[in-house]
Image: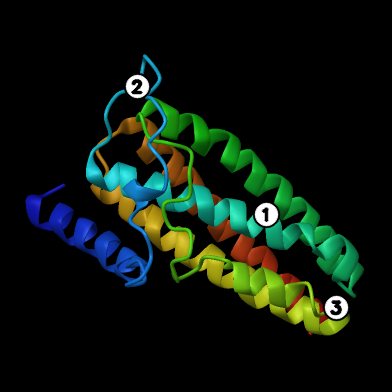
Amino acid sequence: MTKAARATAVLSLLLLLAGCAAPANAPSPSASAPPAPAPPLSVPADPTDAAWVQLMTPMNAQAVALLSLAGQRADDPRIRSWAAALRSAQNDELARLRPLLARMGLPDTNVHKGHDMPGMVTEHDLEHARTVEGGAFDRFLVAQIRDHLRQSAQVSRSETKAGTRPDARRLAAALVSARRAELDRLTRLSARTG
């Protein structure tokens, strides 16, 4: 990869994260809690790798929280089944992301908590999801998860181009492939349920 291509990929990732500025009255992340000690075998992360894994971990965790509501709130059994399968897949990804955080010496905390990130299911979204059910829940779930899948694929593509850690780049490539397949599945599901 040329220096110009790497710089472009890093800039793309940083621009995606630009929506992550903490509110003016929010405490800084370092003021809220001391970082967890790094595991003894950790290898420091470069800023691109760190930004990617620290974004993907809470993105998946928040998506899992929303998908978990589908069992009780979704109207269409196909939506419930799809949500259960995707929740399992997102949990499997979390089981790979969290050890990567540890290997990089990064804490397993949501450094984006309270930030309005593209593709991130927010606490407000979860509150809203708990107030709707049936067809309204189905439409809300599909829209939120489609956005999550698209944005997390975009961020992961940036990691595959600009990241330096082979383990992070391999996982990012796997996530891009999984997102592509899941978006195709969602398109077919929407055509059958719409």
| Element at label 2 | loop
Across and down, in percent, residue 188 comes to 72, 72
Q: Which residue is mark 1?
A: 64
Q: Which residue is mark 2?
A: 42
First along the sequence among labels 3 and 1: 1
Q: CA distance from mark 3 to mark 1?
A: 17 Å
Q: CA distance from mark 2 to mark 3?
A: 44 Å
Question: Residue, x 36% and y 15% (percent of image)?
Answer: 41
Q: What is the three-letter code of the residue carrying label 2?
A: Ser
Colouring scheme applied when the structure was drawn: rainbow
| 63 or 179: nearer the viewer | 63
Please indicate whether residue 70 sits to the left or right of residue 104 in the image. right
First along the sequence among labels 2 and 3: 2
| 192 or 24: nearer the viewer | 24
Quadrant the C terminus occupies: bottom right
Label 2 packing within 10 angstroms: few (<14), some (14-19), many (20+):
some
Picture disc at residue 100: none
Residue 149 falls in image quadrant: bottom right
Q: What is the three-letter code of the residue carrying label 3?
A: Glu
| Element at label 1 | helix
Task: Tell me: residue 43, above or below residue 53.
Answer: above
First along the sequence among labels 1 and 2: 2
Question: Residue, x 74% and y 74% (percent of image)?
Answer: 129
Q: CA distance from mark 1 to mark 2?
A: 27 Å
Please indicate whether residue 179 sits to the left or right of residue 190 in the image. left
Across and down, in percent, residue 151 comes to 46, 66
Q: Which residue is mark 3?
A: 133
Question: Residue, x 76% and y 71% (percent of image)?
Answer: 189
How many numbered marks does the figure carry? 3
Q: Residue furthest left?
A: 3
